[in-house]
Image (cartoon, rainbow, N blue to C red):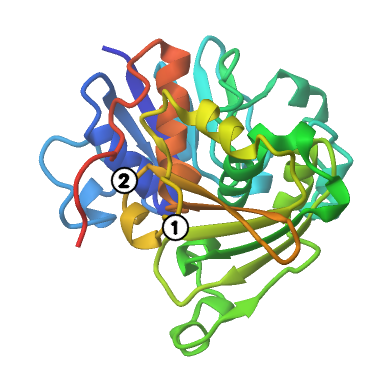
Amino acid sequence: MPTASIIGCSGYTGQETLDRVLAHPELELVALGSDSLAGQLASALDIRLNGSLPAFVANAEALASGADVLFVCLGHDEAAALEPPADTVVVDLSGAHRLRDSALYDSWYGFTHPRAETLAGWSYALPELYPPTGTLIANPGCYATAVLLALGPLADSLDPESVVVDAKSGVSGAGRAPKPSSHAGFVLENLSPYRAGSHQHAPELEQALGFPVCFVPHLLPLRRGLLATCYARAGNDAHERLEDAYADSDVVRMLPEGMAPELGRVQGTDTAEVALFEDRPTGKTIVACAIDNLGKGAAGQAVQNANLALGLEETAGLRLTGVLV
């Protein structure tokens, strides 16, 4: 049975990745890495984590655990400095290896990439559109995942100057570390755009689509969930392209005509819902995609990528079924 280690397990993405690894029928957990929780039992993260789970160790020790797959759930700059172990599948959930042009890290992420020469060796992998190649895998950002699922199959038929993306995410997208914008007094009963024109997922979208898009993220007064509504001038075959792209997918659902994506159906899961509409007054195409920002937008996609890289069942360990209330 392949073995797995998680580095940076004390954050939201680390905890969500752990949950999926524990549910995975073909992965054995061998190390939980967290510098802040090193030496403590797994229950220090969540009281429900007891039994035979390994105790937390420092991230460096988890990195050297010899696991077959390593999930990296660190901050961008920490992950960028990481030296991956040889002959190991490494899935990086941060943005440290998503961009091919190292110069972009200074302007979009606020640090100079310390291992710029290694970026070409990382595979940017959104399984339905760009399956992973090799053992070094850059997991897409949550916003980028939703937007690319909506627009990726249409990219070469779009008028680039017409594309506008309005996206909204729950507060967990900002991570576990407290900050003024994640305080209940700011989030609850409120809705606001943030980092308009300067969000780090913008160059990721441009790299994948081949052109820049006007992208405005918003903070929802919800714990989790993400909805991206994309407006563009597209070819007449947009619906057929999307249906063809996801016809065989167990993760992405192309919804029937007249049905809209809903956060309530994807929250807590690793699925995605995509729907297409036509705006009669302008003739524009509207494509909406709903995901869970911690599921398909992070941990679920990371496990999906790992499964493909290890030659396992693509959906093993994922949360795909069930009717949520």
Mark nearer the viewer, 2 or 1: 1
Q: Quadrant of residue 135?
A: top right
Dot 1: element: loop
- Quadrant, the C terminus: bottom left
For label 1, the residue is 260
The single residue placed furthest to the left in the displayed view is 51
**Mark 2: which amino acid?**
Gly
Tell me the crowding category of disc 2: few under 14, some 14 to 19, or many 20 or more residues within 10 angstroms, Cα based: some
Q: In the image shown, does 239 or 307 lie closer to the viewer? A: 239
The label shown at residue 39 is: 2
**Mark 1: which amino acid?**
Ala
Q: Which residue does the image show at 54% across and 40% down from the upper left?
A: 93
Q: Quadrant of residue 166?
A: bottom right
- Residue 51 visible from this viewpoint: yes
Q: Quadrant of residue 1?
A: top left
Q: In the image shown, does 109 or 250 lie closer to the viewer? A: 250
User: Measured from the top left, where is residue 317 in percent x and y?
Assistant: 28, 31
User: Measured from the top left, where is residue 82 in percent x and y?
Assistant: 63, 32
User: Measured from the top left, where is residue 240 in percent x and y?
Assistant: 57, 32
Dot 2: element: loop
Q: Between disc 2 and disc 1, whose residue precedes?
A: 2
- The reply, left or right, for residue 71 in relation to residue 162 is left
